[in-house]
Amino acid sequence: MSAFALSIGVSLMLVGILLLGLELVHPGVLLFIPGSVLIVGGFLYIFLPDVLLNSVLGTLVVLVVAVAAGLLEIPYYRYAAPTHKPMTTTVGGLVGEEGIVTVAVVPNTLRGKIRVGSEIWSVDAAQPIPAGTRVKIIRGEGVSLRVEPIEAHAPP
């Protein structure tokens, strides 16, 4: 094997390792598959150049590696990027959540305000609710919420 052929094989493997490293540093860029293919292709180019370049077997090996890398990448991305709540809040998404009244709620008006997480929402209720009361969101109405106070359960 010539020095030029060896340098090509080593270069392929180094680029593949670099891509895998970048994928570990910044998950979700989809570099796992090409990185794996380049590593295996570089290995075959160095140690079995005739298999890689002059036969169907080399193509099949690279294809099998690409499919296997794709199948391994799916669970990895599920682990690396766990699901989370949506980044935007809608009134429908708040139903069932709890909040704290920051401005007293007056029935049939939108003067009342509650804090849900880090957001302040206008609310309405069927009864007056003083500031500081924990409330549960029962439905969304346009850009406001309908709430009811959470009953404080007395010990038996």
Image (cartoon, helix red, strand yellow):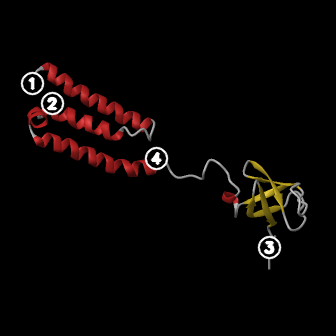
Chain-order first, disc 4 or disc 2: 2
Mark 1: few/some/many CA within 10 Å (<14, 14-19, 20+):
few
**Residue corresponding to mark 2:** 46
Between circles 1 and 3, the one closer to the viewer is 1
What quarter of the picture does the N terminus occupy? Answer: top left
The outermost residue toward the top is: 3
Q: Is mark 2 on a helix, strand or loop?
A: helix
* Image spot of residue 136 (x, y percent): 76, 64
Determine the residue positioned at 16% across, 19% down. 4
Distance between the Cα atoms at labels 1 and 4?
Answer: 41 Å
**Residue corresponding to mark 4:** 80
Q: Which amino acid does label 4 sit on?
A: Ala
Chain-order first, disc 3 or disc 4: 4
Chain-order first, disc 1 or disc 3: 1
The outermost residue toward the bottom is: 156
Distance between the Cα atoms at labels 4 and 2?
Answer: 33 Å
**Residue corresponding to mark 1:** 1
User: Which numbered disc covers residue 153?
Assistant: 3
Between circles 3 and 2, the one closer to the viewer is 2
Mark 3: few/some/many CA within 10 Å (<14, 14-19, 20+):
few
Q: What residue type is labelled 3?
A: His
